[in-house]
Image (spheres, rainbow, N blue to C red):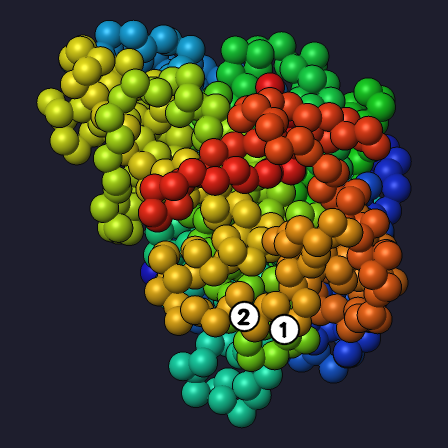
Amino acid sequence: MLGFKARIVIARCRPELARIPSLEEAPVFHPSEEEFEDTLKYVASILPHIKHYGICRIVPPSSWKPPSRIEEPSTVYGVNTHIQRTSDLQNLFFKKRLEAACTRTNNKQQKILSRKSDFGHGIERKEFGCCNEHFEFENGPKLMLKYFKHYADHFKKQYFVKEDQITASEPSIQDIEGEYWRIIENPTEEIEVLQGTSAEIKATESGFPHEWDVTSRRRPQYVESGWNLNNTPKLQDSLLRFGSCESSSILLPRLSIGMCFSSNLWRIEEHHLYLLSYMQFGAPKIFYGVPGSYRCKFEEAVKKHLPQLSAHPCLLQNIAFQFSPSILTSEGIPVYRCVQNPKEFVLILPGAYHAHVDSGFNCSEAVNFAPFDWLPHGQNAVELYSEQGRKTSISYDKLLFEAATEGIRALAELPLLHKKSFDYLKWRAVCRSTGILTKALKSRFATEVRRRKYMCASLESQKMEDDFCATVKRECPICYYDLYLSAIGCKCSPYKYTCLLHAKQLCSCAWSEKYLLIRYKIDELSIMVEALDGKVSAVHKWAKEKLGLPVSDISKDSSKDGMKVKSESGQSLDIEQDRKEEVSIPSVGPSARTNNLNRVSGSWDGLSHRPQSKGIINDKIEVLFPKISQHATVGKNIMTSSSNTVLKKHLALESSSTKRSVIILSDDEN
């Protein structure tokens, strides 16, 4: 661990040339102690108010005083640094970055083509871009934290001193911000700063306390808090808990040490995940955010001003450049600003471009998480990454299907224990036909059915081993698509697989030599969708055959609760109790208002379960399931008179190999 001699700072601030962007402030929230208790419930409650901003600041209650593993006075920790040349971030830096990307792309193409016998002969050049090359700044010295602080304080003091002053007064946030964007847009001197990461806190790269910390045992509320970034990704309502924390650093907090003008360049979080940032101590951090709904317009604006990016779209999402907010606002793109102070949080929504600049020496950390309303963003990111040939960091399919499995387990077990319990109500809110988990599963199911039908219908199917993706994340070598749900293999290459879209590029063998490797059959997926939709027989079948649960009495118990409803003609309909209660339960989803208290990731305190009249129940059933002819053709689209919703009739197989008709409510994607 080295000391570091502070350099003489020759460059000086030029306030007369300051470029202060005129931006609207992002929302700021001050939760009460009660609201602050449940992290994801609170995030869900403010979501309707911030979805048009993409970013917000959360100020904890005054009682929030967690102990830190890194205290400012105790500066004995080590810091790995890298060098940022702020004056090059938009011009020379970008040019060098683009040249390096082109070189890596050409080298990668040559390497791939030299090994084409391993993957076949049909690989297109466009499928191998620079998207998997993460940019890294030049390494700086390895310092003790106290030396980093001395260097940061010395630079700031010397840079903002005026000619007629011996010592500089402390610059304001506005002074620093205006000078930073002046350097970016119109550099006159070379400005070099350091940014650091922890060199010693290797367990989780977090300053928050852990359960094994002796000093934290006296205050266990902070060890267990959902606002402790060690816990946030693994909270009960975060889908990342279904992934292995050892499989990707994206699931762990990242610690950052900054100084004046050190910055994070414009970026979107990987897989369009949520981001929660927390400042442990130090000078404020200035954040900028663009709402996710303007993502495409943001990228078009950047390409307009930097046309070289058209050939390398991956640079847009890979921390590759800095861009003035003033240019973005001139293109009609809203940019929102917020200043994060010590002990405060900043929340970034899925798909939102964001950047930040430090105003002085500070220590902060950030982590990703994924409540249920992230699912549509996650699916979009997977398809986008595949199109760009970019590696994935997590398995979206694993998160989705393991969450669906747990949801079915809850629907099967909890009614027999306590039908009005919190867990049961929570799972029922994200399941059922209107639940966001059910919708995500239906969308993924439709995509999988379509690809199996048109890409590999003639191939022999083989069941995946249970540990196929248990220890190693499998991905397509062509487009890096995740292979958790299905893959294409060949007898000539027992350990090589592609996604369904690139089956012909696996090898040069005959098509008959290839096979389809699947985790679930189509009829199994169909039953899974029905079970998550709340169909009692499907829940019973999946729980018994796939989960091994002793639920043989579920139908009888459900009947007692009125979960099977008879139509006016006396025919028994497989409509569970949830259908009857839909009339009285407010809708749940990311667009629900705060006062509904029906959040995907929160609690449901305001639910009412008033008994409904038989007429209301039957009317509700008729809306959901209009009368269909008993002789309707399998696969025929049946339009309802009330909307454009299409009822599709599919065939599924029972364990006895007898066929039965299954009605699945879905949009006509074809």
Q: Is residue 228 visible?
A: no
Q: Mark 1 and 2 residues: CB-CB less than 8 Å, in contact?
A: yes
Q: Which mark is residue 560?
A: 1
Q: What residue occupies the far left of the structure in this picture?
A: 492
x then y, percent, for residue 619: 83, 49
Whether residue 31 is situated above or below residue 490 in the rendered picture: below
Q: Quadrant of residue 77?
A: bottom left
Q: Quadrant of residue 479?
A: top left
Q: Which mark is residue 665?
A: none
- Tag 1, which secondary structure? helix
Q: CA distance from mark 1 to mark 2?
A: 6 Å
Q: Amino acid at mark 2?
A: Lys
Left or right placement of residue 226 versus residue 112 in this view = right
x then y, percent, for residue 228: 57, 70
Q: Nearer the viewer, residue 402 or 299?
A: 402
Q: Residues within 10 Å of mark 1 (few under 14, many from 20)?
A: few
Left or right placement of residue 412 versus residue 452 in this view = right
Residue drawn at x 58%, y 53% is: 535
Q: Quadrant of residue 125?
A: top left
Whether residue 606 is situated above or below residue 353 in the rendered picture: below
Q: Amino acid at mark 1?
A: Lys
x then y, percent, for residue 254: 50, 55
Q: Which residue is mark 2?
A: 556
Q: What residue occupies the far front of the structure in this picture?
A: 569
- Tag 2, which secondary structure? helix
Q: Nearer the viewer, residue 510 or 308?
A: 510
Whether residue 558 is situated above or below residue 277 in the rendered picture: below
Q: Residues within 10 Å of mark 2 (few under 14, many from 20)?
A: few
Residue drawn at x 38%, y 41% is: 658
Residue drawn at x 46%, y 76% is: 210
Whether residue 607 is situated above or below residue 154 in the rendered picture: below
